[in-house]
């Protein structure tokens, strides 16, 4: 029986392929992280549609696993999290715009205030609303992106005055280099956080992303904010990834063809085959988030796809909707038009594709396209 020819829903045949998202692996990963940081609450970053995997499915699964706090980048994302988790605490990382006060009340989400101006806008909104509403305060300790600078921290009103106007429900900062073990900036950021957080009213503290959680208990504080590790991605560079892979991506073989030694494949004739070669043409491409930079040329090997246990290297550039794999070494009867190839899974992971494309797993996950049939394995 050729690889997986039967048993596919018609819908998958009409799509670029099939993306299977394992919610059980997601909740296992979250529990694994929670167990590594037992003294702290384990939140979850679900921005960018839960790193591309779907807020509507991921948030209820994490809620059922015990997660109570979610971080998103945008208010629009907070609305979707709220719809999926009526009782959760939701923080919006992307800065507070003064016109959005009512939307925070409506959704029950909390802004993460990252400048004196945002603090003063939120305080103004709370006074007008006549309510001491909760918000997080973000201190910049070395990322130089969002958050109060050291100077701004020193210019803050006294903690008691601040606490009268709104509730500081979390004090946080974000690590720039935790993915590199023992990076000196991580230590410096922790030291700065340790000093500056006391300029604010007493509140739970949060510093660690996935890498911080996995690499050093001194970074855990009261709440960790993992993202990538929940979704199975590599968080700490150069260490084995302790998380379960979450996504499996398969594309259909559109056709098979045999070309002679010396022929080139694809746009730009970027790769010439040295032997007579059997090619499987697969129905996914860079428009589906299968990044063009992972293609193959005469100078550089590209990504690998799998047919069952058999590996097949890509040949030539990745097109918008199609890729070509060299299946010469796989017995002919194992692959036919209509067979399925695994583009991402346990054998060739999101991080493997990222490495071939010169990027990180985060970009692969958040770039996964919308032309796949999406199936969820229930937690
Ligand atoms: C995205 C993000 C995280 C999660 O980072 P990971 O590396 O995915 O674990 C945590 N905190 C902040 C502020 C973020 O923006």
Image: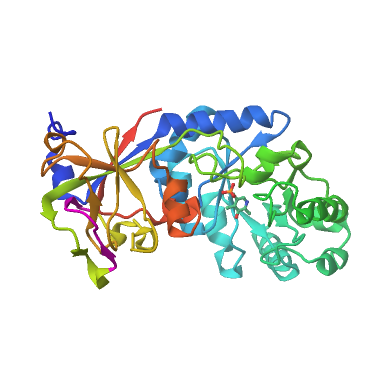
Magenta-colored span: 270-283
- For residue 143, above or below residue 221: below
Q: Is residue 266 above or below residue 237?
A: below
> In the picture provided, is 285 more to the left or to the right than 237?
left
Q: Height in image: 98 above or below 332?
A: below
Tell me where residue 379 appears, x and y as whole percent. Answer: 41, 27
Q: Residue at x 72, y 56 (%)?
A: 137
Counting from the top left corner in percent of width and height, residue 232 is at 49, 39
Give the x, y percent position of residue 200: 83, 54
Q: Is residue 33 visible?
A: yes
Q: Is residue 280 magenta?
A: yes
Residue 78 visible in image: no
Q: How many marks?
A: 0
| Rendering quarter of residue 156 | bottom right
**Residue sitting nearer the eye, 109 or 253:** 253
- Which quarter of the image is occupied by the N terminus? top left
Residue 242: image x %, image y %?
56, 33
Please say whether residue 219 is one of the residues in the magenta stretch.
Answer: no
Q: Does residue 46 appear left or right of residue 39 in this picture?
A: left
Residue placed at 49% from the left, 34% from the top?
62
Instruction: Say which residue appears at 34% left-offset and 57% top-offset.
Output: 289
């Amino acid at each position: 029986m050729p690889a997986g020819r039967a048993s596919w829903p018609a819908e998958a045949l009409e799509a670029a392929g099939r993306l299977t998202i394992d919610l059980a692996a997601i909740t296992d990963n979250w529990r694994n992280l929670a167990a590594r940081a037992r003294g702290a609450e384990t939140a979850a970053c679900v921005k960018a549609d839960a790193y591309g995997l779907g807020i509507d499915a991921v948030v209820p699964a994490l809620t059922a696993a015990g997660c109570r706090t979610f971080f998103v980048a945008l208010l629009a994302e907070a609305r979707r999290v709220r719809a999926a988790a009526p009782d959760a605490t939701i923080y919006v990382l992307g800065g507070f715009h003064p016109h959005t006060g009512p939307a925070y009340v409506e959704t029950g989400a909390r802004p993460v205030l990252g400048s004196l101006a945002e603090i003063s806008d939120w305080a103004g909104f709370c006074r007008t609303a006549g309510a001491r509403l909760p918000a997080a305060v973000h201190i910049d300790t070395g990322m130089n992106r969002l958050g109060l600078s050291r100077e701004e921290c020193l210019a803050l009103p006294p903690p008691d005055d601040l606490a009268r106007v709104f509730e500081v429900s979390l004090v946080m900062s974000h690590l720039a280099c935790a993915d590199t073990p023992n990076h000196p900036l991580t230590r410096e950021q922790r030291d700065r956080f340790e000093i500056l957080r006391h300029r604010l009213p007493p509140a739970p503290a949060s510093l660690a992303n996935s890498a911080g959680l996995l690499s050093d208990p001194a970074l855990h504080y009261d709440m960790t904010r993992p993202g990538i590790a929940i979704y199975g991605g590599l968080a700490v560079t150069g260490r084995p990834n302790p998380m379960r892979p979450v996504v499996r991506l398969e594309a259909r073989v559109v056709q098979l063809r045999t070309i002679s030694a010396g022929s080139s494949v694809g746009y730009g004739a970027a790769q010439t085959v040295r032997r007579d070669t059997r090619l499987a043409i697969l129905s996914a491409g860079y428009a589906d988030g299968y990044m063009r930079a992972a293609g193959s040329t005469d100078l550089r090997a590209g990504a690998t796809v799998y047919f069952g246990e058999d590996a097949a290297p890509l040949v030539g550039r990745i097109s918008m909707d199609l890729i070509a794999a060299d299946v010469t070494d796989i017995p002919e009867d194992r692959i036919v038009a209509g067979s399925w190839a695994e583009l991402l899974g346990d054998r060739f992971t999101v991080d493997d594709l990222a490495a071939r494309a010169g990027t990180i797993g985060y970009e692969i996950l958040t770039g996964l396209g919308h032309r796949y049939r999406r199936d969820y394995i229930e937690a």
